[in-house]
Amino acid sequence: MEIVVLPDSESVAEFSANIVVELMRKKPAAVLGLATGSTPIALYQHLVERYRSEDVSFSEVVTFNLDEYLGLDPSNPQSYRSFMNSQLFDHVDIDLRNTHLPHCEEAQNPRKVGAAYEREISHAGGIDLQILGIGANGHIGFNEPTSSLRSRTRVKTLTERTVQDNSRLFKPHEAQPQLAMTMGIATILEARQLVLMATGESKAHSVRQAIEGPLSAMCPASALQLHENVVFILDEDAACELEGLAYYRWAHAKNQLLVGQHGYFDEGLTSLDVG
Ligand code: PGA
């Protein structure tokens, strides 16, 4: 694991965007795993700017999102499809047919939809780089505490805490879904590179549990300890409870010497395991 602690949320977004752009330059048909929520919005703004300045093209990129609410039509402004369109897809040259979210129609069997999503990821060659946020309760995607560490794409019931945390995004008259279809923890762990972004003090506890706590289904993000290429990109507030902070800063400074020379991905797209 590499733990990168940066001064503020803007630097977190910029650092994350640099990793995504590096991958897209080395592999124009990269398969990106994307996340929703407040945290990656600034990352998507950076990617749109980089596209506008002709630094990078999405024309061959394929994307798979972590999750989607159950019971919301993709055209609903609260759906994660709408979020992705308005935050990223509408502003870049991506082919919308290459963008995927685990949407399940009311008449569909969620088990079949989950299995089909897994097959689509696998047909695309697997995910090269998965972007993740983290819940205040340690969730990744909508894998809430007690999610099996071997879980696959399926329906999860959101915890009260998550529903409460996300209620800020819903207007009083809007119904807030309490079920979602999400990639499983095993699905996430199969991505070749993971980038977890966390900002703000409300994430400090779950970030600490994920990095320094025991491997436990009670903190789904702790499963990232099993992955060989994971970078946690944190602002000072999200990192404030970490006990090993001094070491992480020191190691990151050393790692940057290596990354500066070789980048995060080598030509064969094996990520550089510097953590
Ligand atoms: P947030 O959500 O970025 O809106 O804080 C992250 C998450 O719940 O995964």
Image: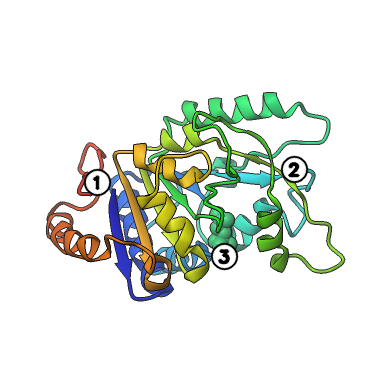
Marker count (numbered): 3
Dividing the picture into quarters, in which one does residue 117 lie? top right
Residue ID at (58%, 38%): 146
Name the residue that disc number 2 marks. Answer: 70
Q: Are marks 3 and 2 in contact (CB under 8 Å)?
A: no
Q: Earlier in the sequence, mark 3 or mark 1?
A: 3
| Residue at the (55%, 35%) spot, across then down | 184
SS at badge 1: loop
User: In what element is the residue under mark 3?
Assistant: loop
C-alpha gap between disc 3 and disc 2:
20 Å
**Residue at image x 75%, y 65%?**
170
Report which residue position mark 3 lands on. Answer: 38
Which tag is nearer the camera, tag 1 or tag 2? Answer: 2
Rounded to the nearest whole Å, what is the CA distance between mark 3 and mark 1? 27 Å
How far across and how far down the image is residue 130, in percent? 43, 45
Question: Does the Cβ of the disc 2 residue fall within 8 Å of ligand 1?
Answer: no
